[in-house]
Image (spheres, grey):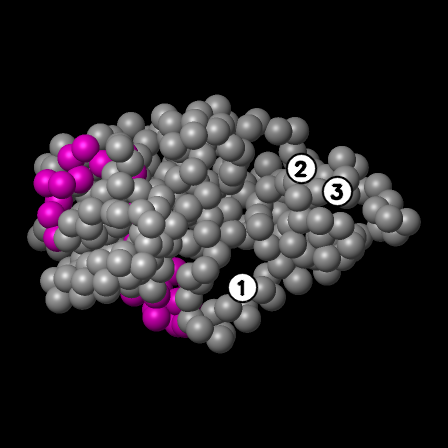
Amino acid sequence: MRKIGIIGLGHVGRMLANQLVVNGKTDVLVLIDKDDQLAVGVQADLNDAQSALATHTQIIVQDYAALADADIVVTAFGKSELLKQQPMAELETSYHEAQVVGKQLNESGFAGIIINLTNPNEAITAVLQQAVCLPPKQVIGLGTVIETARLHRAIAEAAKVATANVSGFVYGQHDGHQVFAWSTVHVNGQPLTAAINGHHLDQSQLKIKANLSNWYTLSGIGYNVSAATAWTLRIMTAIFADEQLALPVAIYQPQYSTYVSFPALIGRQGVGNLLLLNLYPLEQEEIKSAAETIKQQLASLNNIEGSSDK
């Protein structure tokens, strides 16, 4: 029996719940939000929809104890409207909520896998891991998965090939210090330095095009929802199928002693082997710099905690 929890019923949380129920992706769905009326409303709306479906999902609301035997919990709390101010505007509010959520998850006896969607993604994933007291391999963030997908699409359109023909990763920090690891990129099995369909691709233009997609999304609707939902579902599939799917999720990377977006294999255990690829020296330094930025964020949160204790 597949059992999934969603904590936070904002734009992404609600769409994810809808997709899980409509497509019959889970047998039991636990929905939790700070707003009781919202949670009950989402439950009622989904139950109304189920009369048209060939599958049935049991929907439980506002019950942390029901998460004790859940396979996966998705954390999607936060204030996405703050992203219009600056990418890291959610840091302090998300930090306090992550501590509360982590503590309640810990007390529930939850021992599954957490997929964190809350931003700033790497830092808040680290906070959740500490608060819930689970092994780091079981607490992952969406990381730079969407940035990597955007890069693949930009390259595919420029090279006039299918997106599936493009591989490679964006490392570092979601909506922050992104590291476009060109050394990892291949098109039709060829490195990006080779001529693709008779011509060379401009890395700077590819990066601009990939970032423009995010700009259009945030300018137009203020938050990412469809891509975040689709990739969360993809990660869930990889976990349930023990797929060992390579994605640049937010994970604890011992080399940098912090959470950072880094490619790893995702399966039933959560994070499996890390992909230790041969990167350019400059790329290695950029990833290190991104990790230092995340460490500074976490240090600033510790300062906030220390001030509040006085």
Is disc 3 placed on a helix, strand or loop? strand
| Disc with the residue nearer the chain's start (2 vs 1) | 2
- Residue 286, magenta (yes or no): no
Residue 262 makes an appearance in the image = yes
Which residue does the numbered mark 1 point to in the structure image? 214
Residue at horizontal 81%, vertical 42%? 193
Question: The disc labelled 3 sits on which kind of residue?
Answer: Val
User: On residue 184, which mark appears?
Assistant: 2
Is disc 1 placed on a helix, strand or loop? helix
Q: Is residue 86 above or below residue 280?
A: below
Residue 98 place in picture, x, y as percent:
23, 49
Quarter of the rendering occupied by the N terminus: top left
Question: The disc labelled 2 sits on which kind of residue?
Answer: Thr
Q: Nearer the viewer, residue 104 or 130?
A: 104
Residue 160 place in picture, x, y as percent:
78, 54
Query: Magenta residues, as a range?
Result: 62-91
Other residues around mark 2 within 10 Å, as few (<14) / some (14–19) / many (≥20) = some
Residue at horizontal 45%, vertical 60%? 226
Other residues around mark 3 within 10 Å, as few (<14) / some (14–19) / many (≥20) = many
**Disc 2 to disc 1, C-alpha distance:** 22 Å
Which residue does the numbered mark 3 point to in the structure image? 187
